[in-house]
Image (tube, coloured by chain):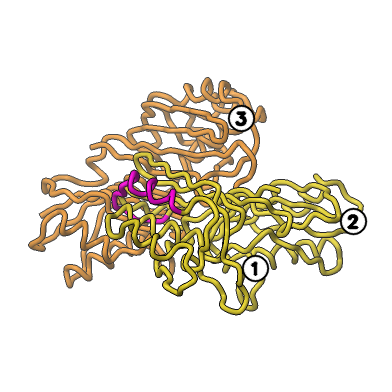
Chain colours: A orange, B yellow
Protein backbone atom coordinates (compact mmCIF):
# COMPACT_ATOMS: atom_id res chain seq x y z
CA UNK A 1 0.00 0.00 0.00
CA UNK A 2 1.31 3.44 -0.95
CA UNK A 3 0.83 6.36 1.45
CA UNK A 4 0.95 10.09 0.79
CA UNK A 5 2.12 12.01 3.85
CA UNK A 6 2.04 15.75 4.56
CA UNK A 7 4.69 16.81 7.04
CA UNK A 8 5.66 20.07 8.77
CA UNK A 9 9.08 20.79 10.16
CA UNK A 10 11.18 23.49 11.72
CA UNK A 11 14.27 23.59 9.51
CA UNK A 12 16.46 25.35 12.09
CA UNK A 13 18.28 22.29 13.34
CA UNK A 14 18.36 20.31 10.10
CA UNK A 15 20.93 20.38 7.39
CA UNK A 16 18.01 20.19 4.96
CA UNK A 17 15.48 17.57 3.95
CA UNK A 18 17.78 15.20 2.12
CA UNK A 19 19.75 12.50 3.94
CA UNK A 20 23.40 13.43 4.31
CA UNK A 21 26.24 11.62 5.99
CA UNK A 22 27.16 13.11 9.39
CA UNK A 23 24.39 15.71 9.33
CA UNK A 24 20.89 15.73 10.76
CA UNK A 25 18.25 15.58 7.98
CA UNK A 26 14.45 15.39 7.94
CA UNK A 27 14.53 12.39 5.59
CA UNK A 28 16.82 10.35 7.85
CA UNK A 29 14.70 11.12 10.95
CA UNK A 30 11.51 10.01 9.21
CA UNK A 31 13.07 6.89 7.70
CA UNK A 32 14.45 5.93 11.09
CA UNK A 33 10.95 6.21 12.62
CA UNK A 34 9.42 4.13 9.81
CA UNK A 35 12.14 1.53 10.24
CA UNK A 36 11.24 1.23 13.92
CA UNK A 37 7.57 0.78 13.04
CA UNK A 38 8.17 -1.71 10.18
CA UNK A 39 11.20 -3.58 11.60
CA UNK A 40 12.79 -3.10 8.18
CA UNK A 41 14.30 -0.28 6.15
CA UNK A 42 11.65 1.92 4.49
CA UNK A 43 12.59 4.46 1.86
CA UNK A 44 10.59 7.68 1.53
CA UNK A 45 10.42 9.83 -1.60
CA UNK A 46 10.04 13.54 -0.89
CA UNK A 47 8.37 16.02 -3.24
CA UNK A 48 11.59 17.97 -3.26
CA UNK A 49 14.50 19.00 -1.14
CA UNK A 50 14.55 21.91 1.20
CA UNK A 51 17.90 23.43 2.15
CA UNK A 52 19.51 23.97 5.53
CA UNK A 53 17.34 26.17 7.79
CA UNK A 54 14.35 26.14 5.40
CA UNK A 55 10.99 25.31 7.01
CA UNK A 56 8.05 23.28 5.74
CA UNK A 57 4.35 23.79 6.38
CA UNK A 58 3.32 21.25 3.77
CA UNK A 59 6.14 19.05 2.54
CA UNK A 60 4.91 15.83 0.96
CA UNK A 61 6.48 12.39 0.71
CA UNK A 62 5.30 8.91 -0.20
CA UNK A 63 6.29 5.46 0.93
CA UNK A 64 5.12 1.86 0.58
CA UNK A 65 4.06 -0.20 3.57
CA UNK A 66 2.57 -3.61 4.34
CA UNK A 67 1.65 -2.66 7.90
CA UNK A 68 -1.91 -3.50 8.94
CA UNK A 69 -2.70 -0.07 10.31
CA UNK A 70 -5.15 2.78 9.67
CA UNK A 71 -4.11 6.13 8.23
CA UNK A 72 -4.71 7.70 11.67
CA UNK A 73 -2.72 4.90 13.28
CA UNK A 74 0.23 5.65 11.01
CA UNK A 75 -0.02 9.37 11.75
CA UNK A 76 -0.16 8.87 15.51
CA UNK A 77 2.53 6.20 15.48
CA UNK A 78 4.92 8.37 13.51
CA UNK A 79 4.26 11.47 15.61
CA UNK A 80 4.84 9.58 18.83
CA UNK A 81 8.33 8.62 17.61
CA UNK A 82 9.36 11.74 15.66
CA UNK A 83 11.48 14.48 17.29
CA UNK A 84 9.64 17.69 18.36
CA UNK A 85 10.69 19.63 15.24
CA UNK A 86 8.92 17.27 12.78
CA UNK A 87 5.16 16.66 12.75
CA UNK A 88 3.04 14.55 10.43
CA UNK A 89 -0.12 16.49 9.56
CA UNK A 90 -1.81 13.97 7.33
CA UNK A 91 -1.49 10.39 6.07
CA UNK A 92 -3.60 9.15 3.16
CA UNK A 93 -3.68 5.92 1.21
CA UNK A 94 -2.97 6.68 -2.42
CA UNK A 95 -2.70 4.85 -5.72
CA UNK A 96 0.43 2.90 -6.61
CA UNK A 97 1.26 5.33 -9.41
CA UNK A 98 1.29 8.37 -7.13
CA UNK A 99 4.78 9.82 -6.89
CA UNK A 100 5.50 12.66 -4.45
CA UNK A 101 7.98 14.27 -6.82
CA UNK A 102 6.79 13.41 -10.33
CA UNK A 103 3.06 13.79 -9.69
CA UNK A 104 3.44 17.30 -8.24
CA UNK A 105 1.68 19.94 -10.37
CA UNK A 106 2.69 23.07 -8.47
CA UNK A 107 4.41 24.24 -5.31
CA UNK A 108 3.98 27.30 -3.15
CA UNK A 109 6.89 28.86 -1.27
CA UNK A 110 6.62 31.77 1.17
CA UNK A 111 9.42 34.13 2.18
CA UNK A 112 9.19 36.35 5.29
CA UNK A 113 11.23 39.53 5.75
CA UNK A 114 11.26 41.76 8.84
CA UNK A 115 11.39 45.36 7.56
CA UNK A 116 10.94 46.73 11.06
CA UNK A 117 13.44 46.73 13.94
CA UNK A 118 15.53 43.61 14.66
CA UNK A 119 13.64 40.92 16.58
CA UNK A 120 15.82 38.43 18.50
CA UNK A 121 12.84 36.06 18.92
CA UNK A 122 12.43 35.32 15.21
CA UNK A 123 16.02 35.05 14.02
CA UNK A 124 15.46 31.51 12.74
CA UNK A 125 12.05 32.20 11.17
CA UNK A 126 12.14 35.60 9.49
CA UNK A 127 14.94 37.22 7.49
CA UNK A 128 16.08 40.20 9.54
CA UNK A 129 16.54 42.81 6.84
CA UNK A 130 15.42 45.58 9.23
CA UNK A 131 15.21 48.17 6.48
CA UNK A 132 12.29 49.58 4.54
CA UNK A 133 11.39 48.15 1.17
CA UNK A 134 9.64 49.90 -1.70
CA UNK A 135 6.91 47.35 -2.19
CA UNK A 136 5.55 48.92 -5.38
CA UNK A 137 8.88 48.62 -7.17
CA UNK A 138 9.05 44.98 -6.04
CA UNK A 139 5.52 44.16 -7.23
CA UNK A 140 6.25 45.69 -10.63
CA UNK A 141 9.57 43.85 -11.02
CA UNK A 142 8.02 40.56 -9.89
CA UNK A 143 5.76 40.49 -12.95
CA UNK A 144 8.87 39.93 -15.08
CA UNK A 145 9.31 36.49 -13.50
CA UNK A 146 5.71 35.41 -14.11
CA UNK A 147 4.97 32.89 -16.84
CA UNK A 148 7.38 30.47 -18.52
CA UNK A 149 11.02 31.48 -18.31
CA UNK A 150 14.53 30.14 -18.45
CA UNK A 151 15.96 30.56 -14.94
CA UNK A 152 19.53 29.53 -15.84
CA UNK A 153 20.92 32.70 -14.23
CA UNK A 154 18.57 32.60 -11.24
CA UNK A 155 19.42 29.27 -9.68
CA UNK A 156 22.22 27.39 -8.00
CA UNK A 157 22.14 24.57 -10.52
CA UNK A 158 24.49 21.65 -10.35
CA UNK A 159 26.35 21.66 -13.67
CA UNK A 160 26.23 17.90 -14.17
CA UNK A 161 22.70 17.24 -12.97
CA UNK A 162 20.39 20.03 -14.08
CA UNK A 163 19.80 20.46 -17.76
CA UNK A 164 16.43 22.07 -18.09
CA UNK A 165 16.16 25.54 -16.57
CA UNK A 166 12.70 26.39 -17.87
CA UNK A 167 10.02 26.69 -15.20
CA UNK A 168 6.58 28.29 -15.05
CA UNK A 169 5.79 30.76 -12.28
CA UNK A 170 2.03 31.08 -11.89
CA UNK A 171 2.01 33.90 -9.38
CA UNK A 172 4.15 36.06 -7.14
CA UNK A 173 2.23 37.82 -4.39
CA UNK A 174 3.94 40.49 -2.30
CA UNK A 175 2.23 41.77 0.84
CA UNK A 176 3.32 44.26 3.46
CA UNK A 177 2.06 45.01 6.94
CA UNK A 178 3.68 47.19 9.61
CA UNK A 179 6.45 44.67 10.35
CA UNK A 180 6.79 42.18 7.54
CA UNK A 181 7.06 41.86 3.80
CA UNK A 182 5.83 38.44 2.70
CA UNK A 183 6.48 37.07 -0.76
CA UNK A 184 4.54 34.03 -1.95
CA UNK A 185 5.59 32.29 -5.15
CA UNK A 186 3.67 29.54 -6.90
CA UNK A 187 5.19 27.62 -9.76
CA UNK A 188 5.29 24.25 -11.47
CA UNK A 189 8.72 23.56 -10.03
CA UNK A 190 11.78 25.24 -8.61
CA UNK A 191 15.48 24.69 -9.20
CA UNK A 192 17.79 24.86 -6.20
CA UNK A 193 18.08 28.39 -4.69
CA UNK A 194 15.65 29.71 -7.35
CA UNK A 195 13.16 31.15 -4.84
CA UNK A 196 15.88 32.66 -2.70
CA UNK A 197 17.58 34.22 -5.74
CA UNK A 198 14.33 35.67 -7.08
CA UNK A 199 13.47 37.08 -3.64
CA UNK A 200 17.01 38.46 -3.26
CA UNK A 201 16.85 40.46 -6.46
CA UNK A 202 13.37 41.73 -5.57
CA UNK A 203 14.82 42.88 -2.22
CA UNK A 204 17.68 44.65 -4.01
CA UNK A 205 15.10 46.40 -6.19
CA UNK A 206 12.98 47.25 -3.13
CA UNK A 207 16.05 48.80 -1.52
CA UNK A 208 16.73 50.84 -4.67
CA UNK A 209 20.11 49.16 -5.19
CA UNK A 210 19.18 47.48 -8.48
CA UNK A 211 16.56 48.03 -11.14
CA UNK A 212 14.62 45.89 -13.58
CA UNK A 213 17.44 45.91 -16.11
CA UNK A 214 19.27 43.47 -13.84
CA UNK A 215 16.48 40.94 -14.42
CA UNK A 216 16.15 41.76 -18.13
CA UNK A 217 19.85 41.03 -18.69
CA UNK A 218 19.69 37.63 -17.02
CA UNK A 219 16.24 36.08 -17.40
CA UNK A 220 15.65 33.80 -20.42
CA UNK A 221 19.33 33.85 -21.23
CA UNK A 222 21.59 30.83 -21.66
CA UNK A 223 24.66 33.01 -21.40
CA UNK A 224 26.22 32.52 -18.00
CA UNK A 225 25.67 35.74 -16.07
CA UNK A 226 24.41 34.48 -12.76
CA UNK A 227 22.82 36.59 -10.10
CA UNK A 228 25.02 36.36 -7.02
CA UNK A 229 22.31 37.38 -4.56
CA UNK A 230 20.53 34.90 -2.33
CA UNK A 231 18.47 35.63 0.79
CA UNK A 232 19.06 33.38 3.83
CA UNK A 233 17.22 30.07 4.15
CA UNK A 234 15.68 30.86 7.56
CA UNK A 235 12.94 33.10 6.07
CA UNK A 236 11.80 30.45 3.56
CA UNK A 237 8.80 28.12 3.95
CA UNK A 238 7.64 25.33 1.66
CA UNK A 239 3.92 25.96 2.12
CA UNK A 240 1.99 23.66 -0.15
CA UNK A 241 2.29 21.15 -2.96
CA UNK A 242 -0.59 20.56 -5.32
CA UNK A 243 -1.16 17.29 -7.17
CA UNK B 1 25.48 58.55 34.72
CA UNK B 2 22.71 56.01 35.24
CA UNK B 3 21.06 54.38 32.21
CA UNK B 4 17.72 52.61 31.92
CA UNK B 5 17.78 49.95 29.21
CA UNK B 6 14.91 48.00 27.63
CA UNK B 7 16.01 44.66 26.25
CA UNK B 8 14.34 41.82 24.30
CA UNK B 9 15.57 38.27 24.28
CA UNK B 10 14.74 34.81 23.09
CA UNK B 11 14.91 32.71 26.25
CA UNK B 12 15.31 29.40 24.43
CA UNK B 13 19.04 29.06 24.81
CA UNK B 14 19.42 30.76 28.18
CA UNK B 15 19.21 29.24 31.61
CA UNK B 16 17.30 32.36 32.60
CA UNK B 17 18.13 36.02 33.12
CA UNK B 18 20.23 35.70 36.24
CA UNK B 19 23.94 34.95 36.11
CA UNK B 20 24.69 31.33 37.02
CA UNK B 21 27.93 29.44 37.13
CA UNK B 22 28.41 27.10 34.14
CA UNK B 23 25.16 28.17 32.43
CA UNK B 24 24.44 30.75 29.76
CA UNK B 25 22.47 33.71 31.18
CA UNK B 26 21.20 36.98 29.74
CA UNK B 27 22.76 38.95 32.58
CA UNK B 28 26.23 37.49 32.02
CA UNK B 29 26.06 38.12 28.25
CA UNK B 30 25.10 41.77 28.77
CA UNK B 31 27.69 42.36 31.50
CA UNK B 32 30.37 40.83 29.31
CA UNK B 33 29.47 43.24 26.48
CA UNK B 34 29.49 46.23 28.85
CA UNK B 35 32.85 45.14 30.22
CA UNK B 36 34.27 45.13 26.68
CA UNK B 37 32.92 48.63 26.09
CA UNK B 38 34.06 50.04 29.45
CA UNK B 39 37.33 48.09 29.89
CA UNK B 40 36.14 47.35 33.43
CA UNK B 41 33.51 45.21 35.13
CA UNK B 42 30.03 46.75 34.99
CA UNK B 43 27.18 45.38 37.06
CA UNK B 44 23.61 45.55 35.75
CA UNK B 45 20.48 45.40 37.90
CA UNK B 46 17.52 43.73 36.21
CA UNK B 47 13.89 44.48 36.99
CA UNK B 48 13.43 40.83 37.81
CA UNK B 49 14.52 37.38 36.87
CA UNK B 50 13.04 35.34 34.10
CA UNK B 51 13.40 31.57 34.24
CA UNK B 52 14.92 29.13 31.77
CA UNK B 53 13.19 29.33 28.37
CA UNK B 54 11.13 32.42 29.27
CA UNK B 55 11.23 35.23 26.70
CA UNK B 56 11.32 38.99 27.15
CA UNK B 57 9.79 41.68 24.96
CA UNK B 58 10.46 44.44 27.46
CA UNK B 59 12.85 43.44 30.23
CA UNK B 60 14.45 46.45 31.95
CA UNK B 61 17.80 46.88 33.66
CA UNK B 62 19.90 49.80 34.85
CA UNK B 63 23.62 50.37 35.11
CA UNK B 64 26.05 53.22 35.81
CA UNK B 65 28.60 54.37 33.27
CA UNK B 66 31.20 57.10 32.84
CA UNK B 67 31.51 56.54 29.10
CA UNK B 68 31.34 59.66 26.94
CA UNK B 69 28.73 58.31 24.56
CA UNK B 70 25.18 59.11 23.44
CA UNK B 71 22.16 56.96 24.29
CA UNK B 72 22.02 55.86 20.64
CA UNK B 73 25.75 55.15 20.71
CA UNK B 74 25.30 52.87 23.70
CA UNK B 75 22.38 51.09 22.03
CA UNK B 76 24.28 50.52 18.79
CA UNK B 77 27.49 49.59 20.56
CA UNK B 78 25.77 47.01 22.72
CA UNK B 79 23.78 45.52 19.84
CA UNK B 80 26.89 45.17 17.71
CA UNK B 81 28.49 43.03 20.43
CA UNK B 82 25.48 41.12 21.79
CA UNK B 83 24.63 37.61 20.53
CA UNK B 84 21.71 37.32 18.06
CA UNK B 85 19.22 36.27 20.75
CA UNK B 86 19.53 39.49 22.78
CA UNK B 87 18.63 42.93 21.44
CA UNK B 88 18.67 46.31 23.14
CA UNK B 89 15.52 48.21 22.14
CA UNK B 90 16.08 51.42 24.06
CA UNK B 91 18.69 53.21 26.20
CA UNK B 92 17.79 56.30 28.20
CA UNK B 93 19.68 58.42 30.72
CA UNK B 94 17.83 58.36 34.01
CA UNK B 95 18.10 59.84 37.49
CA UNK B 96 20.54 58.37 40.01
CA UNK B 97 17.69 57.18 42.21
CA UNK B 98 16.06 55.10 39.46
CA UNK B 99 16.25 51.41 40.30
CA UNK B 100 15.11 48.83 37.73
CA UNK B 101 13.71 46.53 40.43
CA UNK B 102 12.58 48.81 43.27
CA UNK B 103 11.13 51.59 41.10
CA UNK B 104 8.94 49.20 39.09
CA UNK B 105 5.22 49.90 39.59
CA UNK B 106 3.76 47.06 37.55
CA UNK B 107 4.69 44.27 35.17
CA UNK B 108 2.84 42.59 32.34
CA UNK B 109 3.39 38.94 31.47
CA UNK B 110 1.84 37.14 28.48
CA UNK B 111 1.32 33.40 28.14
CA UNK B 112 0.64 31.73 24.76
CA UNK B 113 -1.07 28.36 24.39
CA UNK B 114 -1.66 26.48 21.13
CA UNK B 115 -5.14 24.92 21.43
CA UNK B 116 -5.03 23.77 17.82
CA UNK B 117 -2.94 20.97 16.30
CA UNK B 118 0.72 20.60 17.27
CA UNK B 119 3.04 23.02 15.48
CA UNK B 120 6.71 21.94 15.30
CA UNK B 121 7.74 25.48 14.30
CA UNK B 122 6.73 27.12 17.58
CA UNK B 123 7.80 24.53 20.14
CA UNK B 124 10.03 27.04 21.92
CA UNK B 125 7.56 29.93 21.76
CA UNK B 126 4.06 28.60 22.44
CA UNK B 127 2.95 25.97 24.94
CA UNK B 128 1.69 23.03 22.84
CA UNK B 129 -1.40 22.04 24.77
CA UNK B 130 -3.16 21.02 21.52
CA UNK B 131 -6.52 20.62 23.21
CA UNK B 132 -9.58 22.84 23.40
CA UNK B 133 -10.07 25.13 26.36
CA UNK B 134 -13.36 26.43 27.74
CA UNK B 135 -12.43 30.10 27.71
CA UNK B 136 -15.55 31.23 29.59
CA UNK B 137 -14.77 29.04 32.57
CA UNK B 138 -11.22 30.40 32.56
CA UNK B 139 -12.32 34.03 32.39
CA UNK B 140 -14.70 33.50 35.29
CA UNK B 141 -12.10 31.73 37.44
CA UNK B 142 -9.47 34.37 36.64
CA UNK B 143 -11.49 37.04 38.44
CA UNK B 144 -10.72 35.23 41.70
CA UNK B 145 -7.04 36.18 41.34
CA UNK B 146 -7.72 39.86 40.69
CA UNK B 147 -6.99 42.38 43.41
CA UNK B 148 -4.76 41.97 46.46
CA UNK B 149 -4.18 38.37 47.51
CA UNK B 150 -1.80 36.14 49.36
CA UNK B 151 -0.20 33.87 46.74
CA UNK B 152 1.63 31.61 49.23
CA UNK B 153 0.15 28.51 47.58
CA UNK B 154 0.56 29.79 44.02
CA UNK B 155 4.29 30.35 43.83
CA UNK B 156 7.58 28.48 43.91
CA UNK B 157 8.90 30.56 46.77
CA UNK B 158 12.27 29.95 48.30
CA UNK B 159 11.60 29.23 51.97
CA UNK B 160 14.51 31.28 53.31
CA UNK B 161 14.24 34.27 51.01
CA UNK B 162 10.60 35.11 50.35
CA UNK B 163 8.52 36.29 53.27
CA UNK B 164 5.80 38.41 51.80
CA UNK B 165 3.41 36.57 49.51
CA UNK B 166 0.88 39.36 49.04
CA UNK B 167 0.71 40.80 45.54
CA UNK B 168 -1.84 42.86 43.62
CA UNK B 169 -3.07 41.63 40.26
CA UNK B 170 -4.57 44.52 38.30
CA UNK B 171 -5.91 42.54 35.39
CA UNK B 172 -6.03 39.13 33.74
CA UNK B 173 -7.07 39.20 30.10
CA UNK B 174 -7.84 35.96 28.31
CA UNK B 175 -8.27 35.99 24.54
CA UNK B 176 -8.89 33.22 22.07
CA UNK B 177 -8.56 33.05 18.31
CA UNK B 178 -8.70 29.98 16.09
CA UNK B 179 -5.28 28.72 17.15
CA UNK B 180 -4.20 30.34 20.38
CA UNK B 181 -5.35 31.18 23.85
CA UNK B 182 -3.40 34.15 25.17
CA UNK B 183 -3.42 35.13 28.83
CA UNK B 184 -2.08 38.53 29.84
CA UNK B 185 -1.53 39.29 33.51
CA UNK B 186 -0.65 42.68 34.95
CA UNK B 187 0.35 43.05 38.57
CA UNK B 188 2.52 45.03 40.96
CA UNK B 189 4.95 42.14 41.23
CA UNK B 190 5.25 38.42 40.80
CA UNK B 191 6.86 35.76 42.95
CA UNK B 192 8.80 33.01 41.20
CA UNK B 193 6.56 30.67 39.11
CA UNK B 194 3.49 32.69 40.15
CA UNK B 195 2.36 33.47 36.58
CA UNK B 196 2.98 29.91 35.40
CA UNK B 197 1.07 28.47 38.39
CA UNK B 198 -1.89 30.81 37.90
CA UNK B 199 -1.99 29.99 34.19
CA UNK B 200 -1.67 26.26 34.94
CA UNK B 201 -4.70 26.19 37.19
CA UNK B 202 -6.68 28.27 34.68
CA UNK B 203 -5.76 25.67 32.04
CA UNK B 204 -6.90 22.83 34.32
CA UNK B 205 -10.20 24.67 34.76
CA UNK B 206 -10.47 25.28 31.00
CA UNK B 207 -9.96 21.55 30.44
CA UNK B 208 -12.69 20.76 32.99
CA UNK B 209 -10.25 18.90 35.24
CA UNK B 210 -10.52 21.29 38.18
CA UNK B 211 -13.04 23.87 39.33
CA UNK B 212 -12.95 27.14 41.21
CA UNK B 213 -12.95 25.39 44.59
CA UNK B 214 -9.30 24.50 43.92
CA UNK B 215 -8.47 28.21 43.94
CA UNK B 216 -10.76 28.99 46.88
CA UNK B 217 -9.03 26.39 49.03
CA UNK B 218 -5.57 27.80 48.34
CA UNK B 219 -5.70 31.54 47.67
CA UNK B 220 -5.25 33.90 50.66
CA UNK B 221 -4.26 30.99 52.84
CA UNK B 222 -1.07 30.68 54.87
CA UNK B 223 -1.63 27.00 55.35
CA UNK B 224 0.73 25.10 53.09
CA UNK B 225 -1.36 23.50 50.36
CA UNK B 226 0.56 24.36 47.25
CA UNK B 227 -0.73 23.99 43.74
CA UNK B 228 1.54 21.54 41.97
CA UNK B 229 0.67 22.67 38.47
CA UNK B 230 3.00 24.85 36.41
CA UNK B 231 2.88 25.45 32.64
CA UNK B 232 6.23 25.32 30.76
CA UNK B 233 8.43 28.40 30.56
CA UNK B 234 8.57 28.47 26.75
CA UNK B 235 5.08 30.04 26.39
CA UNK B 236 5.85 32.89 28.80
CA UNK B 237 6.83 36.43 27.82
CA UNK B 238 7.79 39.32 30.07
CA UNK B 239 6.08 42.01 28.01
CA UNK B 240 6.36 45.34 29.79
CA UNK B 241 7.44 46.97 33.02
CA UNK B 242 5.91 50.26 34.09
CA UNK B 243 7.68 52.78 36.31
Range covered by the magenta-colored residues: B127-144
As drawn, A91 above or below B153? above
Judging by the rendered image, the residue that carries numbered circle 1 is B18
Do tags 3 and 2 sit on the same chain? no
Q: Does dot 3 land on a helix, a strand or a loop?
A: loop
A179 falls in the magenta region: no
Disc 1 to disc 2, C-alpha distance: 25 Å
Q: Are marks 3 and 1 in contact (CB under 8 Å)?
A: no
User: Upstream in the sequence, badge 1 or badge 2?
Assistant: 1
- Seen at 41% across and 56% down, the residue is B127
The quarter in which the N terminus of chain B is drawn is bottom right
Q: Tell me if I can see residue B70 in this picture.
A: yes
Q: Does dot 1 land on a helix, a strand or a loop?
A: loop
Judging by the rendered image, the residue that carries numbered circle 2 is B67
- Rendering quarter of residue A129: top right
- Rendering quarter of residue A164: top left
Viewer-nearest of labels 3 and 1?
1
Disc 3 to disc 2, C-alpha distance: 35 Å
Q: Chain of mark 3?
A: A
Q: Are marks 1 and 2 in contact (CB under 8 Å)?
A: no
Viewer-nearest of labels 1 and 2?
1
Judging by the rendered image, the residue that carries numbered circle 3 is A133
Q: Tell me if I can see residue A123 in this picture.
A: no
Q: Few, some or many C-alpha atoms within 10 Å of disc 1 (few <14, some 14-19, many ≥20)?
A: many
Q: Is residue B195 left or right of residue B6?
A: left
Q: Nearer the viewer, residue B56 or B32?
A: B56
Image coordinates of residue A152 in percent, x first then y, are 46, 36
Disc 3 to disc 1, C-alpha distance: 38 Å
Residue at the limit of the structure toward the left, as seen here: A68
Amino acid sequence: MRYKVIVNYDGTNFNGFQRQKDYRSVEAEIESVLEKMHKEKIRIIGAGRTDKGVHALGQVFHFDSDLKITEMGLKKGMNSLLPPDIYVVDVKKTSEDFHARYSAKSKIYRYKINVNEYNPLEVNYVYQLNRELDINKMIKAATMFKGEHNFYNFCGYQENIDKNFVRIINSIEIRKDDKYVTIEIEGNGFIRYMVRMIVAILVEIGLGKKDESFIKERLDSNIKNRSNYKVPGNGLYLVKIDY
